[in-house]
Image: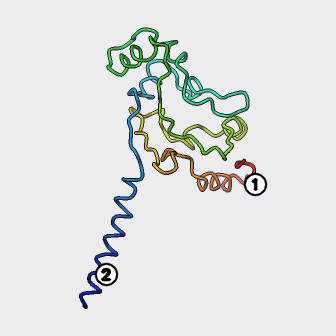
Amino acid sequence: MPRGSLIFGFGVATALAAGWFAFPQALYFRSEQPVEFRHKTHAEKSGTAQCGDCHSFREDGAFGGIPRMEACAACHAERVGTSQAEASLVDGFIKKGQETPWHELYRQPPNVWFSHTIHTRLARLTCKECHGAYGDANDLPPYERNRISGYSRKVMDMNGCEDCHRKRGVEVSCLGCHE
């Protein structure tokens, strides 16, 4: 094998390895949530088994987002346990009247309109069907933000939405979701 072909092959292999392994590591900024949160513990101890017990919808049917501090303060105005995470939440945010700066794992791009109400009430989808079993998880996944787009790695994928619609025989035009 000529030396030039060997060098070229090595260069191609190096570029592929960098693109496959190094680029995704460099593309995403990883950050832990500000407070350790366990959905499973809350579901078991407080009986909040439904996502809607803490996560609400706005009047327009859009997701209201991460629960406001008042929702947490209803049970955690004072510490009810002994964990460091609860102490951080109560002392660092609730007693100071500050919102916890949670990282939103599933924030959609501004050109996407999505109604949770249509999907959960009309189509009767469960939260798990799109978001997975976070309610059964001990830990929140780390937040991974794309350094270029600014979006979370967990943005709902259009292909997944289209596949779900196809399975259920639901047709939606581009303007049904994109503004």
User: In terms of secondary structure, where does tag 1 sit?
Assistant: loop
Mark toward the start of the polypeptide (2 vs 1) = 2
Q: CA distance from mark 2 to mark 1?
A: 46 Å
User: In terms of secondary structure, where does tag 2 sit?
Assistant: helix
Residue of label 1: 173
Packing grade of label 2 (10 A; few <14, some 14-19, many >=20) is few
Q: Nearer the viewer, residue 159 or 168?
A: 159
Q: Quadrant of residue 143?
A: top left
Q: Residue 156: x, y in percent?
A: 57, 47
Q: Residue 6: x, y in percent?
A: 26, 83
Side (left or right) of 74 relative to 21: right
Above or below, 105 relative to 171: above
Give the residue type at disc 1: Ser
Q: Quadrant of residue 51?
A: top right
Side (left or right) of 77 relative to 116: left
Residue drawn at x 75%, y 54% is 173
Residue drawn at x 35%, y 60% is 21
Give the residue type at disc 2: Phe
Packing grade of label 1 (10 A; few <14, some 14-19, many >=20) is few
Q: Quadrant of residue 5?
A: bottom left
The numbered dot on residue 20 is none
CB contact under 8 Å: marks 2 and 1: no
Residue drawn at x 50%, y 41% is 132
Above or below, 109 relative to 169: above
Residue of label 2: 8
Q: Quadrant of the N terminus?
A: bottom left
Residue drawn at x 54%, y 29% is 66
Q: Nearer the viewer, residue 7 or 170?
A: 7
